[in-house]
Image: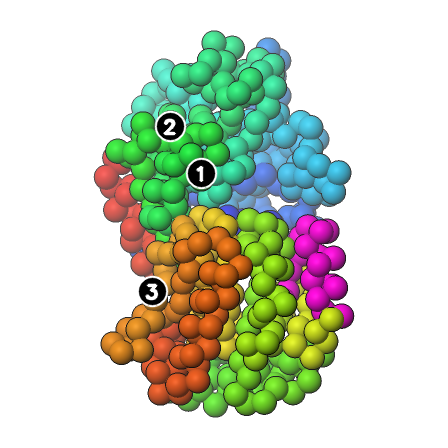
Amino acid sequence: MTPYAKTGGLADVAGALPRFLAKLGHEVKVFMPFYREVRQKGVPLLKAADRLTFDWTGHEESFSVWESAEGGDSTYFIDKPAFYDREHLYETPAGDYPDNGLRFAFFSKASLEALKALNFAPDVLHVHDWQAAIALAYLKYVYAGSPFFKDTKSLCTIHNLAFQGLFDKNVLQAIGLPERLFNIEDLEFHGKVNFLKAGILYASAVSTVSYRYSQEIQTPEFGSGLDGLLRNRSDVLTGILNGVDYSAWNPATDAFLAANYTPSDLSGKAACKKDLLETFGLPPSRSDMPVIGMVSRLTEQKGLAILCESLGNLFPLGVKLVILGTGEEKIRQTLETAKRRYPSFFSLKMAFDDPLAHKIYAGSDLFLIPSRYEPCGLTQMYSLKYGTIPVVRATGGLDDSIQEFSPAEGQGNGFKFEDYSPPALLEAVQTALKVYAQKRSWNALVQNAMACDFSWERSAQEYILLYQNII
């Protein structure tokens, strides 16, 4: 959860959604593990509960709860140093922590116990991804007779179905859940216990982070083996697009930019483009040569495979390309080779660098997102706000948030392609370049993009309607 600990988009959602729900008048408490990363940031904390105990596989275990002392931020941290005081959150460079099943089951059960200690009986328990989904198994099979939770409904949000939390069957006994749940109708999944399956099965409702993704995961191609179960729960399955916190992503106020700009005065964008090229060590561009930007994990899921295949045909179109990201070694090597081959047209920085990401959103003309699948995606929303036009593959949240631009009608905010292939990617870029050459149409497109509203206020209202439907 931002700003405490982050590995991806889930942290942005967990950080923003509760704040906007609270602004709209709702009482929200958020629970996360007390990771070492939180300790090292020196977050001001208050002790909310000390040495709470519960039965953990036949013996008593204790934990403490800390509360953020920041004004208006009701975030609680489950303190169990043996589980959470570690260098990484989920995995080391050598792979996942082998006791992740125990770590996140403990977190889930401890959070339920903490709610009791705080005397906060929630109307809706909202769990995110496999790390918290197992809480709903506890709610159903351990706390079923508890008067405290008798009116509590639940929502399980899937941020990426590919990550499900799979563990050996003996984990059930180790975490204090009935061993009878190891069957195909409950938590068994190809010989393993599946934590995310608990959330999908036992939640009052299930959501994903875009409407299109909620449909895609009901198919064998995107269902990661759970498509049948998701089809069975389709009556309570919905999609709500993530939002953007425009206080952090706004070219009019962004402190990382060489110059600020607004829809009514775009003059600063040229200075941002010049600064971007200098930062990436590329020669100054002719004013009519567009720059394509990417900020992405360098993985096959993000479409880097088809991009790598396209590079030899991309630069003859008359574009420059800048990429920021980290990821798979094979992709990194391919991109490094391309950087040496096309030094005037392509530059790459292998890093996680938030200030540099802001420069790419502002200084590029086009923003490329060729993902094989994309549950929601935030980068296209950021780029729209900065007047940098997305070229995306029509999947998941990319398809929901980007409408193909029509020069004749002046409607739309970007460009899309369907096939996951280099020719389809290149054709979409060519279409974008044709509009770029028509300055009147291009200016209309930039205005459309910057007018898009993907604020968290909108998304939070949709979640409130969903909560109300659940209860």
Q: CA distance from mark 2 to mark 1?
A: 12 Å
- 381 to the left or right of 194: left
What secondary structure do most residues of the magenta stretch adopt?
helix
Instruction: Decide if residue 326 is in sight here.
Output: yes
Seen at 61% across and 59% down, the residue is 309
Residue 365 position within the rendered picture, expressed as x and y whole percent measured from the top left: 50, 77
Seen at 63% across and 83% down, the residue is 275
Badge 2 is on which residue?
A: 228
Viewer-nearest residue: 106 or 284: 284
Seen at 65% across and 77% down, the residue is 345
- Position of residue 137 relative to residue 260, above or below, is above
Q: CA distance from mark 3 to mark 2?
A: 30 Å
Amino acid type at image mark 3:
Gln
- 102 to the left or right of 115: right
SS label for mark 2: helix
Q: Which residues are magenta?
A: 323-340
Badge 3 is on which residue?
A: 403
Mark 2 or 1 closer to N-term? 1
SS label for mark 1: loop
Asked if the residues shown at circle 1 and circle 3 are in contact, with their CB atoms under 8 angstroms apart, the answer is no
Amino acid type at image mark 2:
Gly
